[in-house]
Image (tube, grey):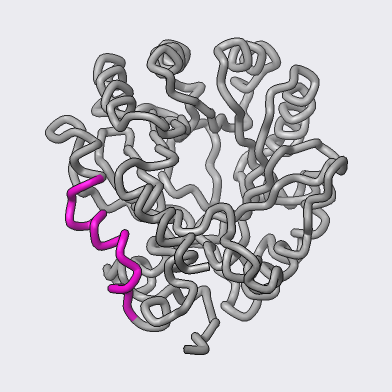
Amino acid sequence: MVSASVATAKFVHERPLRVYWEITRACDLACRHCRATANPNADPDELSTAEGFRLLEQLASFGEPYPHVVLTGGDPLKRRDLFKLIDAARGLGLRVSVAPSATPLLTEKALLKLASAGIDAISLSLDGSTAERHDAIRGIAGTYGRTLEAAHVARVIHLPFQINTLVCADTVDDLPSIYQQVCALGAARWSLFFLVTVGRGQLLQPISAARAEQVLQWAAGLVRRPGTPAPIITSTEAPQLRRVAMQQSGGSGAHHAAGIRDGNGIIFISHTGDICPSGFLEVAAGNIRARTVVDVYRDAPLFVQLRDPDSFHGRCGRCEYRWACGGSRARAYCASGGDALAEDPLCEYESVG
């Protein structure tokens, strides 16, 4: 278990598996949990098209296997050069996914254009099993209907899509109903986004560690069977799902995402070029306007620290699953007042060692 996780960690010391690039913070929604505190207008200091091209070239210089680039925001469809950036990335051999917002910009025509551009997938958000529940989180009426319509179109045109769902006090009791809807929509993946109280998310209430354990136990038990429409289930800022899945399987092998977390296999580029461990741990270790992404990812002290779970503090540092899980570094940073190596308060597991 540990050796496989260590091997994964050593591989991702050299190159990230996923790069999340916030190409803009402009968005026409007002989501209550928005990490980016997005607004309708673009920041005049966001990376230019030319700077975006240089960033993509830097990402390709990590070498094969290339990182998977996720274009996020804000709303990527608010950038006029979105498809130029996708074409440039694909020309460099980079795989690309896009995380659009459910606004009037997300039309059938836009989805067809995204599919024709050769992207791997899109992600859509579903935070409630009814319009009332979902739109209350999103802050704009009609987003629920647009999300379902976008999922329908994506399925018809064979564009794979992931559904993201916020896990907080307002949504947790609705998760079983949302899961049934995710299955019915035909999503390839369902990612549970456990609230980190940053940005507008500071106004929402996280669930307790005990409730999180119950949710993770339930989610890990939703086994995907061959030939069924059930999605692959993943988590964001709750790597404890790996520990739970490994416990349920009797420790028969490492979880497929073992060792991957903020700064270790994951990197985030802000709309102004800041290089951070993740969008929820938006602590800049450099900026692409001054340093290359490759150098920062491999050598910046913050990233080096985040890749050594033996140095983590509290229960996370002594847990036997620290290499496979490691806890949410973003939540640890937020809850401790600035220590990215602190223990993750979402987890109540106590090491048996």
**Spot occupied by residue 60 in the image (x, y as percentages of width and height):** 33, 25
Which quadrant of the view contains residue 208? bottom right
Picture coordinates of residue 272, whole percent (x, y): 26, 33
Query: Residue drawn at (64%, 37%), measured in percent from left and top?
Result: 124
Instruction: Say if 289 sits above or below 317 in the image.
Output: above
Q: Is residue 304 magenta?
A: yes
Q: Residue at x 62, y 80 (%)?
A: 210
- Judge whether 341 appears above or below 81 on screen: below
Instruction: Give the answer, above or below, for where 61 lies relative to 329.
Output: above
On the picture, is 92 further left or further right than 47?
A: right
Whether residue 294 is visible to the viewer of this picture, yes or no, is yes
- Identify the magenta region: 298-313
Front-most of residues 41 and 113: 113
Looking at this view, name the residue that lies furthest to the left. Answer: 290
Rendered position, 55 above or below 183 = above
- Per the picture, the main secondary structure of the magenta-coloured stretch is helix
Give the residue displayed 42% in from the left and 30% down from the top.
Answer: 26
* Residue at 76%, 64% in the rendered image: 221
Residue 10: within the magenta?
Answer: no
Q: Residue furthest bottom?
A: 352
Q: Is residue 278 visible?
A: no
Q: Say which quarter of the image contains residue 293.
A: top left
Indicate the position of residue 9 as horizontal and vertical percent values: 39, 55
- Left or right of residue 253: residue 237: left
Percent x, y of residue 284: 23, 48
Number of dots carrying numbers: 0
